[in-house]
Amino acid sequence: MKALKHLNKYFYKYRSRLIIGIFITIIAKVFMLFTPRLVGDSITIVANRLDGKISQEVFETEIIFNVLYIIGAAIVAGVFTFLMRQTIINVSRYIEYDLKNEIYKHYQVLSLNFYKSNRTGDLMNRISEDVGKVRMYVGPAIMYTMNTITLFVVALIYMTSTAPKLTLYTLLPLPILSVAIYQLSRLINKRSTIVQQSLSTLSTFTQETFSGVSVIKSYGIEPRTNTEFTDFSNQNRQKQINLTKVQALFFPLMILLIGISNLIVIYVGGMQYIDGEIKDIGTIAEFIIYVNMLTWPVATVGWVTSLVQQAEASQERINEFLKTKPDITNTATEPTPIKGDIEFKNVSFTYPDTNIEALKDVSFMLKSGKTLAILGKTGSGKSTILDLIGRLYDINNGSILVDNTTISKLNLYSLRESIGYVPQDAFLFSDTIKNNIKFGKEDATDDEVIEAAKNARVHKNIMGFSKTYETTLGERGITLSGGQKQRVSIARAIIKKPDILLFDDCLSAVDTETEEKILKNLVKLTKDKTTIIVSHRVSSAKNADKIIVLDDGKVIQTGNHDSLINKEGYYKELYTKQLSEKEM
């Protein structure tokens, strides 16, 4: 139960609703337990009439009143039972909502390294399946526990006051029940954990398959993926069956023990009535009803125990992530104004998940409003520089200054709000094109959206769709071509009008003619903004105020276009090669 202690803060938050729920539960059970006594009295009245102890008139009057009392008690108990469910089950929904928000917010602050180490399917499973298991604990499990405890206490008081000895015999099977529940609960806990882990694996595989469906179809490996999915499904099915086998023992065990209790009531109660220890024959009927009324609550003990064990296993998985501390933390409480001066001083960086040293003693300075182009071979560390400027990672050695302040001392949210970032692999959401562009500026007008799209040279493409800007994109923007996705991503960045613009080889899927037009527009738009362009093309870098060339994480050339084409080295070789390809 240690893992479930995390939920105590939510129980405290909704304590007033829970207290009202407990009060309503007690009232409902008190009225419900009027019925056995009234039925017992009615049977005694019938027996007395048959023995001639009461007249027909008294018999009819008492029976009618008892029937009316039974109906009235049932109605009141039903109303309060409805209110009990509305109160306590609603609390479980509130807690489910709060817990999902807590998990989601925590996911948002965790660093990139966390997402590289954990699969998307597993993360989704913990915020959906696992939270669902926890909700069953904070709702039905707690409600039925209160229900059972209240019913037992009230019933025990009634039963003891009527026939103490018979009550003792009736409750004899309960210790056996407790031991059985304890043993089965341990098994359920173990098997629930295994089931949830299996579900995470299945969810991860399914999510990756759907995301990469175009690759699967292109390679014609549908049969192989179907086989793998079937294997995962079969494994999950077997683990679910193993869990169900244990859970299935509860109800037969409950019914057996309740049946034994009924036999005890009939036998012991009958003998006591014969011996005169019980005066009214209706007492036996009353006890049989008590026992049968306790059948469902006793049966739910097993079910509730199962829910608690599953919830504990799920909450433990959730707690693993909630206890994960983000690698990147915001050290500044007050907002930090950003102008855009950027300086790298002997920066070295090694990726924590792969131990690959991406940057080695990199230094450069970029004044606000100026443009820097970064060129180099694949894997030379170009994109890493952009990640470090956005403080997606913290460096190992050296220092990064923004406006002459160490980047770790800046307000993290102020820094990222001042940046417009266009990644190499453009990511678009399953939403309309307009909303994807407005993602950079939520309150942007339609005119601003169109202007941004025109500057990114994607307006004409959008107008070619039947619903134009209201066209809904598929997952990851699959509706658009690679070049269109990149240009929509550019429009999303420039509509934000940030102080710092970072372009990570975002024109790689665009033809050279369109690239030239976009770059001309960017020159106007970035006149007073700090801009860094990562590219494989000299055409994207030639207008930059400063150009640096990286190789194996080191700066091997620095200058502007005119100075670098006159020096032997990587930049001149790349320029010559791309110039000749263009002429061909």
Image (spheres, rainbow, N blue to C red):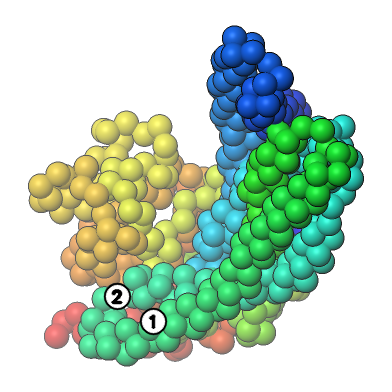
Query: Residue 430 vs residue 253: left or right?
Result: left
Is 174 situated above or below 14?
below
Q: Amino acid at mark 1?
A: Phe
Most foreground residue, 417 or 277? 277
Most foreground residue, 279 or 9? 279
Q: Amino acid at mark 2?
A: Val
Q: CA distance from mark 1 to mark 2?
A: 14 Å
- Which percent across, then down, holds residue 549? 50, 78
Question: Is residue 310 among what the camera can see?
Answer: no
- Which percent across, then down, holds residue 570? 44, 86
Q: Which residue is mark 2?
A: 213
Is 445 situated above or below 328?
above
Which residue is depicted at the point 51% across and 81% down? 238
The label nearer to you, 1 versus 2, is 1
- Which percent across, then down, holds residue 79? 57, 23
Q: Which residue is mark 1?
A: 229
- SS at badge 1: helix
Q: Residues within 10 Å of mark 2 (few under 14, many from 20)?
A: few
